[in-house]
Image (tube, grey):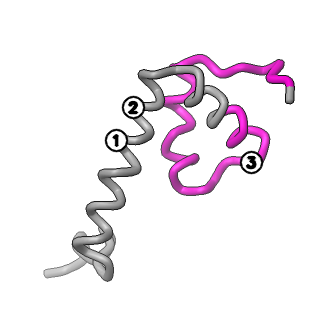
Amino acid sequence: MGHTATLSCSEVRRQLPAYLNGMVDTETAQQLRWHFGQCQNCRLVVRTALNTLSQHFMRHPAETCEEKTHAT
């Protein structure tokens, strides 16, 4: 598979929240995964983000940010 449109690290950082939320198209997701495979720094960032999210939701599975914000 050729990667004619490679993403820079700054583009990856801009796309990361949407990627983590499953909100990017298939082509962008493939480009991001390819970049993670090539770039140790971005790979570390995405792994850290995924681990942080995983730990949070394992500890607070029913809680959402919206529920905390609106709780009085």
Q: Main secondary structure of the magenta part?
A: helix
Q: Nearer the viewer, mark 3 or mark 2?
A: 2
Q: Residues within 10 Å of mark 1 (few under 14, many from 20)?
A: few
In the image, what residue type sits under mark 3? Asp
Residue pointed to by mark 2: 44
Residue drawn at (63%, 54%) of the image: 23
Task: Choose the circle earlier in sequence order: 1 or 3.
Answer: 3
Q: Total number of numbered labels?
A: 3
Q: Give coordinates of residue 48: x percent, y percent.
A: 34, 41
Residue stretch in magenta: 2-31
Mark 3 and mark 2 lie on one chain; the one further toward the N terminus is 3
Amino acid beneath label 1: Thr
Q: Residue at x 44, y 39 (%)?
A: 46
Q: Mark 2 and 1 residues: CB-CB less than 8 Å, in contact?
A: yes
Which residue appears at 41% of the width and 41% of the height?
A: 47
The residue that label 3 is drawn on is 25
- Residue at the image position 49 percent from the left and 30 percent from the top: 13
The residue closer to the viewer here, 10 or 58, is 58
Q: Quadrant of residue 63?
A: bottom left
Is 48 positioned to the left or the right of 6 in the image? left
